[in-house]
Amino acid sequence: MKNMLQEWESRHRKTIIQEIKEAGIELKAENIPRIIKETSFRTRKQKHQRKCPYYKNEESCHPEIKELNCFLCACPEYISEKEEGGCKINSEYGKFTHHENLPAGKVWDCSGCNLYHKKDSVRTFLEKNLEELTKLL
């Protein structure tokens, strides 16, 4: 049985993949630039304003990143197997924060980290994981 974090992570990945498909973009290596553009903060805030509270605002969750990409909002380094989360790479930019709705009373907060929100990181991730992602369709 999946916990809340795993459920959210799974839903997010499936939603992103479905939206790419609905945009008429196949998950193929030659389409990686189109996938990156489709999942950019700029595009998503125009097309999917209700999907994220940050899309309604002009400021993103990571305002320091000029070309923020939302494909990996569910970070591949996040430890979703634990209800309080965590970071597989022990990023110095993350921290635990209080969360009263979770049994541990805390959750790992990655908002200070921007490792997987840059288009070059997304490109590398897609190049390595495209075949696996097609199985989510």
Image: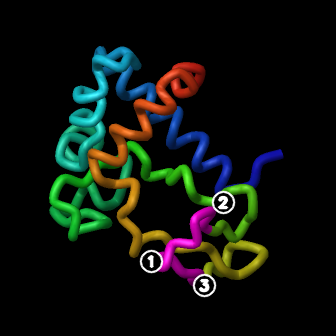
Question: Could you tell me which residue is drawn at 71 percent across and 72 percent down?
Answer: 102
Give whichever of discs 2 and 3 has the lower sequence position.
2
User: Circle 3 is placed at which residue position?
Assistant: 98
Question: Do residues under tags 1 and 3 come within 8 Å of each other at their CB atoms?
Answer: no
Question: On the rendered structure, is 113 left or right of 36?
Answer: right
Question: Could you tell me which residue is drawn at 75 percent across and 63 percent down?
Answer: 82
User: Circle 1 is placed at which residue position?
Assistant: 93
Picture disc at residue 108: none
Magenta range: 87-97
Question: Could you tell me which residue is drawn at 51 percent across and 43 percent down?
Answer: 12
Give whichever of discs 2 and 1 has the lower sequence position.
2
From mark 2 to mark 3, how far is it between C-alphas?
A: 17 Å
Task: Give the structural element (helix, strand or loop) at label 3.
Answer: strand
> How did the renderer colour the structure?
rainbow
Three-letter code for the amino acid on which mark 3 is drawn: His
Nearer to us: label 1 or label 3: 1
Residue 87: quarter of image: bottom right
Residue 28 rendering spot, x and y as whole percentages: 38, 16
Residue 123 rendering spot, x and y as whole percentages: 33, 38
Is 134 situated above or below 45? above
Three-letter code for the amino acid on which mark 1 is drawn: Tyr
Task: Give the structural element (helix, strand or loop) at label 2.
Answer: loop
User: Circle 2 is placed at which residue position?
Assistant: 79
Task: Give the structural element (helix, strand or loop) at label 1.
Answer: loop
Check residue 123 for magenta coloring. Answer: no
Residue 62: quarter of image: bottom left
